[in-house]
Image (cartoon, rainbow, N blue to C red):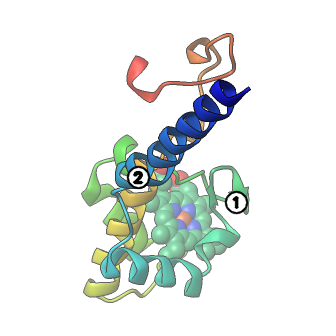
């Protein structure tokens, strides 16, 4: 009986250190102030009304979760600055544009919005580095 209690206590301590110690340190990609400003521009200009992040948002334009790795940066800047026939030109300042780009890159690093079915493991997990 005592052995079980001691074992459980030790496991609890190890688990706690792993979850709150190591786990916390792995999460190093916190949003700096530029990225947070970019998110504010994203919200103020209502990009979400036409675009999705992780599939959530309007459906007039494409999902932009991974646009930073799918498209060249100059193309992204040109779309935002000049618009197209279907997307309006959004008068963002140069600084706001830099912050928006930083925000889109940060979102891109956070994961993949469209998971190709062949990369899903039978356990239901998906490893980004596997492809
Ligand atoms: C009124 C709807 C609308 C709003 C608001 C809007 N967009 Fe778009 N956006 C579009 C459409 C539609 C397209 C596709 C245009 C095309 O292919 O001609 C697009 C395309 C883009 C692209 C290029 C995507 C690609 O795969 O090449 C980027 C980047 C982009 N938008 C960023 C933004 C950002 C950032 C904002 C907010 C500052 C924004 N958009 C606001 C409708 C919108």
Mark 1 C-beta to ligand 1 under 8 Å: yes
Number of marks in the rendered image: 2
Q: For the point 60% across and 51% down, which residue is it?
A: 62
Work out whether residue 47 or residue 18 is closer to the camera in this orientation and state it. 18
Q: Quadrant of residue 115?
A: top right
Q: For the point 68% across and 15% down, which residue is it?
A: 123
Figure check: 126 above or below 28: above
Q: Position of residue 111 (x, y in %)?
A: 49, 43
Q: Which mark is residue 60?
A: 1
Residue 131 visible in the displayed image = no
Q: For the point 60% across and 34% down, which residue is it?
A: 6
Work out whether residue 15 or residue 52 is closer to the camera in this orientation and state it. 15
- Judge from the rendering whether residue 48 lies leftward or rightward of residue 89; answer left or right: right
Q: Which mark is residue 100?
A: none
Work out whether residue 92 or residue 41 is closer to the camera in this orientation and state it. 41
Q: Secondary structure at mark 1?
A: loop
Work out whether residue 28 or residue 92 is closer to the camera in this orientation and state it. 28
Q: Which mark is residue 21?
A: 2
Packing grade of label 1 (10 A; few <14, some 14-19, many >=20) is: few
Q: Position of residue 31 (x, y in %)?
A: 38, 70
Q: Position of residue 106 (x, y in %)?
A: 38, 59
Calculate the distance from the C-alpha at mark 1 to the C-alpha at mark 2: 43 Å
Q: For the point 38% across and 73% down, which residue is it?
A: 100
Residue 94 visible in the displayed image = yes
Q: Quadrant of residue 3?
A: top right
Packing grade of label 2 (10 A; few <14, some 14-19, many >=20) is: few
Q: Quadrant of the C terminus?
A: top left
- Judge from the rendering whether residue 94 lies leftward or rightward of residue 58; answer left or right: left
């Amino acid at each position: 009986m005592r052995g079980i209690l001691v074992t459980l206590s030790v496991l609890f301590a190890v688990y706690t250190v792993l979850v709150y110690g190591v786990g916390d340190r792995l999460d190093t990609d916190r949003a700096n102030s530029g990225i947070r400003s970019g998110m504010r521009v994203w919200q103020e200009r209502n990009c979400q009304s036409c675009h999705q992040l992780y599939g959530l948002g309007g459906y007039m334009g494409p999902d932009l979760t991974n646009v930073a790795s799918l498209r060249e940066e100059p193309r992204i800047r040109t779309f935002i600055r000049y618009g197209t026939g279907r997307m309006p030109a959004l008068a963002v300042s140069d600084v706001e544009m830099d912050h928006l780009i930083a925000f889109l890159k940060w979102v891109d690093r956070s994961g993949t919005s469209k998971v190709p079915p062949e990369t899903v493991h039978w356990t239901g997990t998906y490893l980004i580095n596997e492809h």
